[in-house]
Image (tube, rainbow, N blue to C red):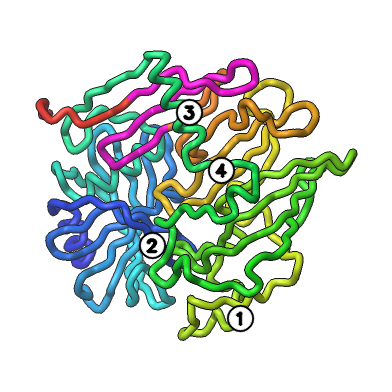
Amino acid sequence: MKKLLILLFSLLISFNSYGVMKLANGIIWHLVSDNSNGNEFYLDMQSIKQKDGLVYYWILVNYDKPMDGFSSAKIFKEGDCSLKRDKTLTMMSYKEPMGEGSDFKTETPSNPEWSYNPPSSGGLFLMEDACIAAGIEITTIDGIEFETTEIKDDVKLKEIEREKKYFGSAGVNWRDNKNYQDYKFDQNVGSSHSIKFNPSELEFIFDKPINGIKITGILIPQFVGDMLNHHWGKALVTFTRLKDNKSFNLYVNKLVFSESSMDNVCEDYQKEDFNFTNCKLTSKVPMIIENTLFDEPTFSFKDIDYDGIEELLFNVKFASRYGSETFAYNINENFELDKINSISIVYTPTTSEFKNKTIINESRGSCCNWTEYTWKAIDGTYTLISVKEFNQFVNVKK
């Protein structure tokens, strides 16, 4: 209990805020902040739940120096977003950093009490990030009100719409895009664009058809073991409708073909001295790729813009705070990509709300600044109708 009290006190100390991620035991931990003691505090974004206005979430603490023989702790929290207070429901202390290993001790307070978080404290940063991710509206961050700016000018909205839809996307022509390189921010320290794969290109097929559509293609591997232990490459993907053999191609500049460091993607990959500059692929040809490696399938078909024709949804896995973005490609009645308006919308599944033929998508730069994009389905595609920017209004203190 003494260790628990010391840790709770450390959460009240002023923090610096970051946005780094680390993978441990299959959990993506987001570094929210550290304090003057050198302790690091992480948030598990996927664990966040809300019920009756309260938010529940797991945090992880990495100690700068071992505390009573423990190097880290995982803590399950209950947060009251309106009153800026939280309870510790369970604490698990680990001998190893990042909550790893089987040697741990569990503490569960019999009658947990509310703890009020002062401004600029780590506990407040963690809880407010959890509240925002859970979709609970808050009017202040760290006791500071927000100012809201809304963009409604049609010309400006069209400019933003084009940028949101087509920035980071690629064309359908394999020859034009084969040497295209992007997502350098996804690379791990051990990986680089100079890695040599053998073979350098290979055919692939997805493990099963989707809605009667077979997915095949050619993969050019790019990375093995990025910061989230994803293995990926760029690819020319062919979608073939089985009932009539009609097909179309789509170039994608990031296709994850494996998601675990336990997969023997390269020969000798499991060895500690594995050389990241050379990778002899162990996959059979064609490589079989699972469509459901993650919560969101890589490819799916669904009518999300209410025109009676299913869109091709491509979920791109990013090494970013919210995990992925979905590109919705328009397909016409002849089972072809719409050449005039190829993309209906680009949105982030974890921060989007669907209702009444609209999608409200939030894009967050930090705990204290974010942008809300409102899209409306019009004539078989999504049109941007409003952009709201939320920023700290530093002149008003609560």
**Extent of the magenta region:** 362-388
| Number of numbered markers | 4
The outermost residue toward the right is 244
Q: Look at 28% across and 66% down and name the residue there.
A: 62
Residue at image mark 2:
22
Residue 367 vs residue 3, the one in the foreground = 367
Task: Count residues near mark 3 (Cα–Cα under 10 Å), then give few for <14, some for 14-19, many for 20+.
Answer: some
Q: Label 2 to label 1, Cα distance in Å?
A: 25 Å
User: Does label 1 or label 3 sit earlier along the sequence?
Assistant: 3
Amino acid under disc 4: Ala
Q: Look at 28% across and 62% down and name the residue there.
A: 61
Q: Label 1 to label 4, Cα distance in Å?
A: 31 Å
User: Does label 2 or label 1 sit earlier along the sequence?
Assistant: 2
Residue 6 vs residue 246, the one in the foreground = 246
Task: Count residues near mark 4 (Cα–Cα under 10 Å), then give few for <14, some for 14-19, many for 20+.
Answer: some
Residue at image mark 4:
170
User: Does label 2 or label 3 sit earlier along the sequence?
Assistant: 2
- Picture quarter containing residue 116? top left
Residue at image mark 3:
162
Report x, y in % for residue 318: 48, 51
> In the visual, does 15 lie left or right of 189?
left
Report x, y in % for residue 53: 37, 33
Amino acid under disc 2: Lys
Task: Count residues near mark 1 (Cα–Cα under 10 Å), then give few for <14, some for 14-19, many for 20+.
Answer: some
- Picture quarter containing residue 147? top left
Quadrant, the N terminus: bottom left
Q: Label 2 to label 3, Cα distance in Å?
A: 33 Å
Q: Label 2 to label 4, Cα distance in Å?
A: 29 Å
Q: Examine the rendering and report whether any part of residue 110 can be seen.
A: no
Report x, y in % for residue 386: 41, 19
Asked whether residue 367 is drawn in magenta, I would say: yes
Residue at image mark 1:
267
